């Protein structure tokens, strides 16, 4: 015997994008009944997190033991961006770093002759970035106006630039690099009923105090106010389209608990907020006789143009003193290179981050000659090497998505219900592939120039930890004005089904060169505003 539910609006997923969509709809469409469906259950509760942190520090034990479903995972990428199926999704684990994209991100074709322009611009997202920053509680410092287009201050004062970061800021300023406190969804002051950050430095993997925003906060608030119904441990496996109108009439699936009960949800509007993997996957799975390639897929672009970025990083030895272990997860950021001019037709845009580091200065068991060190000799060796200053430096650079950067259904691997799992393969577009070596060389040269200008040297340089996946991935249901070249319109509504919406990461055209989650949240808020009918008309540009 199955269970049937009814709602005005059904939201698939309970990650950070879904939390923003639900909060916005609860506010802007107060008469609507909102039902949220999440494949996983609740994982480590706030009261359990201090102990989970202790056990992680003592034994390396995973603080989130109930965050996944064993048989529901994407293949082909080792970045681990698909398995987090629990209330709150991936942002239960995130580091909370919350920068915005830059105005150039939306006009890459116009400005640099590469990739594709978005159908919306920075100014369209501005009010929704602000709203996301308020809802998450982002602490930040405005960058210099020419590199930071935001129109008002952050809702929370910046996380402090402590002694260590002040040393690093002064050092890189000698190479004309301007830096500011990295915007972060961490409470620099008590906010929204949550504590002030205690700088205990375990934001990843778990914040024991609640100072870092996680989406379960929003769900608890909405549930307490009885503004949403949240169905946990229910995997949506199909969307059903009406054969004549194309409207989505129901989402169907099964419990992911032992009973596996069949579930049917009938609603007036459906919002897909399942993140970059599972949104395209669900649309492809929902194929029927009229839609043999999946729903919303008249363009053939569902699952294509998967986007993200890579990085080049390293460690710099600098003059002065940096004391490691003070607040290693907070950093300085610069966005001045996101506005880079073209260089003889070549193209490089990137962000820049700097952290305190103990690289090369840790205690060690053997000296340079390989002789074992014990007791006083070990301490003396450590003392001799511990002085000075080391910085970790990293730049995310743009990687433009190829049409074949793609998610497909892989019949060789199925979940317990027999559904094929997604196979993901990223691919750079021609411009990115041709420029990659040159771009990475330029970044290494920049790091060397910064170290030298500061009177220091490069300790070590390295590329992204792995080449299979990309960071802050997005895409798979790109937005556009032309139904033949995009999956959803600039509001997130799919071209093919008038009551089906794609929220957040999947609707991206490209994925900038900085952390993307704040923009996923802002895109979700914008889609919710259009669904609720409360979005302001677009200002004339
Ligand atoms: C260790 C780590 C650190 C990170 N740090 C940062 C950072 O500092 N800054 C930053 O910008 N980003 C960071 N990220 C990335 C960030 O966490 C993600 O970009 C973001 O959380 C994605 O949110 P989302 O809403 O798009 O999707 P998700 O978080 O993937 O949420 C989707 C949810 O929908 C559910 N779902 C999907 N399909 C279905 C279905 N068919 N039926 C039912 N439920 C479904 C899933 O179970 C999941 O809970 C980090 C990620 C990791 C892993
Ligand atoms: S430093 Fe500690 S208290 Fe602050 S956000 Fe990170 S984990 Fe939470």
Image (tube, rainbow, N blue to C red):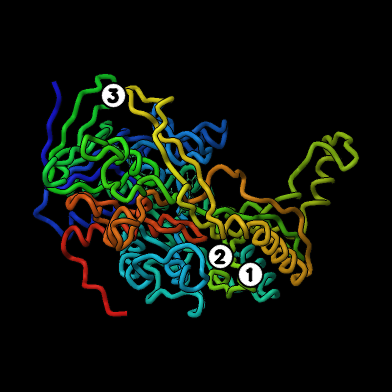
Task: Count neighbours of disc 1 (C-alpha within 10 A) and say few if under 14, some if 14 to 19, many if 20 or more.
Answer: many
Task: Count neighbours of disc 3 (C-alpha within 10 A) and say few if under 14, some if 14 to 19, many if 20 or more.
Answer: some
Which residue is rendered at x = 72% and y = 54% of the image?
461
Say which residue label 1 marks.
169
Name the image quarter holding residue 152.
bottom left
Query: Which of the two discs, 2 and 1, sits closer to the camera?
Result: 2
The quadrant of the image that shows the N terminus is top left
Relative height, residue 207 to residue 253 (above, below): below
Asked if one can make out residue 22 in the rendered structure from this viewpoint, the answer is: no
Relative height, residue 526 to residue 365 (above, below): below
Name the image quarter holding residue 352.
bottom right
The quadrant of the image that shows the C terminus is bottom left
**Viewer-proximal residue among 101 and 139:** 101
**Image position of 24 (left or right of 195):** left
User: Of helix, strand and loop, which one carries label 2?
Assistant: strand
Relative height, residue 16 to residue 448 (above, below): above
Residue 511 percent across, percent down from the top left:
46, 57
Mark 2 CB near ligand 1 (8 Å cut): no
Asked if one can make out residue 294 in the rendered structure from this viewpoint, the answer is: yes
Say which residue label 3 marks.
257
> Nearer the N terminus, badge 1 or badge 3?
1
**Viewer-proximal residue among 461 and 168:** 461
> Nearer the N terminus, badge 2 or badge 1?
1
Which residue is rendered at x = 79% and y = 69% of the image?
455
Asked if marks 3 and 2 touch (Cβ < 8 Å), the reply is no
Quadrant of ligand 1 in image = top left
Q: CA distance from mark 1 to mark 3?
A: 51 Å
Say which residue label 2 marks.
333
> Nearer the N terminus, badge 3 or badge 2?
3
Q: CA distance from mark 2 to mark 1?
A: 10 Å
């Amino acid at each position: 015997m199955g269970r049937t539910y009814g709602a005005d609006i059904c939201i698939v997923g309970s990650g950070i994008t879904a939390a923003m969509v639900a909060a916005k709809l609860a506010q802007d469409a107060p008469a609507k009944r909102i039902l949220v469906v999440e494949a996983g259950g609740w994982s480590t509760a706030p009261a359990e997190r201090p102990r989970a942190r202790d056990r992680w520090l003592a034994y390396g034990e995973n603080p989130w033991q109930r965050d996944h479903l064993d048989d529901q995972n994407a293949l082909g990428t080792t970045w681990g961006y698909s398995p987090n199926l629990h209330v709150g999704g991936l942002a239960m684990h995130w580091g909370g770093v919350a920068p915005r994209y830059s105005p150039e991100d939306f006009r890459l074709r116009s400005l640099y002759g590469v990739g594709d322009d978005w159908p919306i611009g920075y100014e369209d997202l501005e009010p929704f970035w602000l709203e996301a920053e308020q809802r998450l509680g982002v602490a930040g410092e405005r960058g210099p106006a020419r590199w930071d287009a935001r129109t008002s201050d952050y809702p929370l004062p910046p996380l402090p630039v402590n002694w260590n970061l002040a040393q690093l800021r002064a050092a890189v300023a000698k190479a004309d690099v301007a830096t500011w406190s990295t915007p972060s969804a961490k409470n620099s002051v008590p906010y929204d009923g949550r504590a002030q950050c205690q700088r205990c430095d375990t934001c990843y993997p778990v914040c024991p105090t609640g100072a870092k925003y996680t989406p379960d906060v929003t769900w608890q608030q909405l549930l307490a106010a009885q503004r949403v119904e949240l169905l946990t441990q229910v995997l949506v496996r199909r969307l059903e389209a009406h054969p004549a109108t194309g409207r989505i009439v129901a989402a169907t699936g099964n419990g992911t608990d032992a009973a596996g009960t069949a579930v049917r949800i009938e609603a007036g509007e459906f919002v897909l907020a399942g993140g970059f993997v599972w949104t395209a996957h669900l649309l492809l799975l929902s194929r029927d006789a009229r839609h043999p390639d999946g729903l919303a897929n008249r363009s053939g672009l569902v699952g294509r143009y998967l986007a993200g970025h890579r990085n080049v990083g390293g460690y710099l030895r600098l003059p002065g003193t940096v004391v490691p272990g003070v607040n290693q997860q907070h950093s300085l950021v610069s966005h001045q290179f996101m506005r880079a001019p073209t260089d003889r037709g070549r193209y490089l845009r990137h962000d820049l981050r700097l952290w305190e580091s103990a690289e090369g200065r840790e205690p060690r068991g053997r000296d340079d000659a390989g002789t074992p060190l014990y007791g006083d000799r070990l301490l003396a060796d450590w003392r001799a090497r511990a002085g000075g200053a080391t910085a970790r430096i990293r730049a995310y650079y743009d990687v433009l998505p190829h049409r074949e950067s793609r998610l497909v259904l892989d019949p060789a691997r199925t979940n317990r219900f027999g559904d094929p799992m997604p196979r993901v393969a990223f691919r750079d577009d021609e411009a990115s592939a041709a420029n990659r070596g040159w771009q990475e060389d330029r970044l290494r040269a920049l790091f060397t120039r910064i170290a030298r200008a500061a009177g220091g040297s490069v300790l070590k340089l390295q590329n992204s930890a792995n080449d299979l996946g990309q960071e802050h991935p997005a895409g798979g249901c790109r937005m556009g004005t032309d139904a033949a070249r995009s999956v959803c319109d600039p509001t997130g509504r799919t071209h093919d089904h008038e009551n089906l919406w794609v929220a957040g990461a999947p609707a991206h055209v490209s994925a900038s060169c900085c952390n993307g989650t704040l923009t996923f949240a802002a895109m979700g808020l914008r889609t919710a505003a259009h669904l609720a009918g409360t979005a302001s008309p677009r200002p004339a540009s």
